Image (spheres, rainbow, N blue to C red):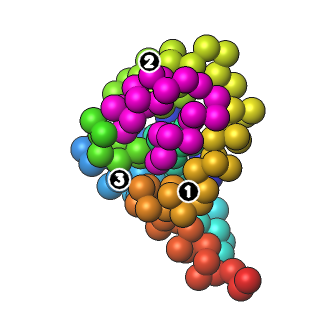
Amino acid sequence: MFDYYGLPENTPGYDLKECDIYGKVKLMEEQISADIGQPNCKFNIVVHEFEGLLFSKPEAFSLITDDSTVKEISKIKESYGNPELINNSPETAPSKRLSKLIRRYSKVKNGTIVAKEIGINSILENCPHFLEWIRFIQGKCSV
């Protein structure tokens, strides 16, 4: 599992001209998985980065910030309709947005707290590409 944002330019498929981010990421994952050559390995690229998944349930941020900031996070999610689509440029990546809104935001510490509060089900309901990867894993692993 790797973030699309920040992948090195020599990543297989990086130079693809696919306009749809889901289409591009899917083609990149296929090329990388083919290069690895293991049937039980499905490379996953998070669209656009892990922090985007945290926008699945903005109210979970109430554990680390005030209500007005939670409202701003909600507005961002609503304006994109899907947490995986939150991104315009390196300056507006999900982690950059959170760092601007939340003083001393720590990707690891705060990201973990918020992710635990959100729970996997909310992320799966809001992030279709991530859901697809989890379904693949579920089909390949016995529990």
Classed neighbour count for the residue bearing mark 1: other residues with Cα under 10 Å, few (<14), some (14–19), many (≥20): many
Q: Which residue is mark 3?
A: 22
**Mark 3 element type:** helix
Residue ID at (51%, 55%) = 123
Q: Earlier in the sequence, mark 3 or mark 1?
A: 3
Tag nearer the camera, 1 or 2: 2
Q: Which residue is mark 2?
A: 91
Would you say residue 128 is visible in this rendering?
yes
Figure check: 29 above or below 14: below
Q: Residue furthest bottom?
A: 142
Tag nearer the camera, 2 or 3: 2
Q: What separation in Å lies between label 2 and label 3 (alpha carbons)? A: 21 Å
* Region in magenta: 56-77
Q: What separation in Å lies between label 1 and label 2 (alpha carbons)? A: 23 Å
Q: Earlier in the sequence, mark 1 or mark 2?
A: 1
**Mark 1 element type:** loop
Q: Residue furthest front?
A: 67
Type of amino acid at the residue the image marks with label 1 = Asn
Q: Which residue is mark 1?
A: 44
Residue ID at (39%, 35%) = 74
Q: Quadrant of residue 99?
A: top right
Label number found at residue 56 = none
Type of amino acid at the residue the image marks with label 2 = Glu
Figure check: 97 above or below 83: above
Query: Residue 56: horizontal and vertical position, in percent?
Result: 47, 48
Asked if residue 67 lies in the magenta stretch, the reply is yes
Residue ID at (50%, 58%) = 122
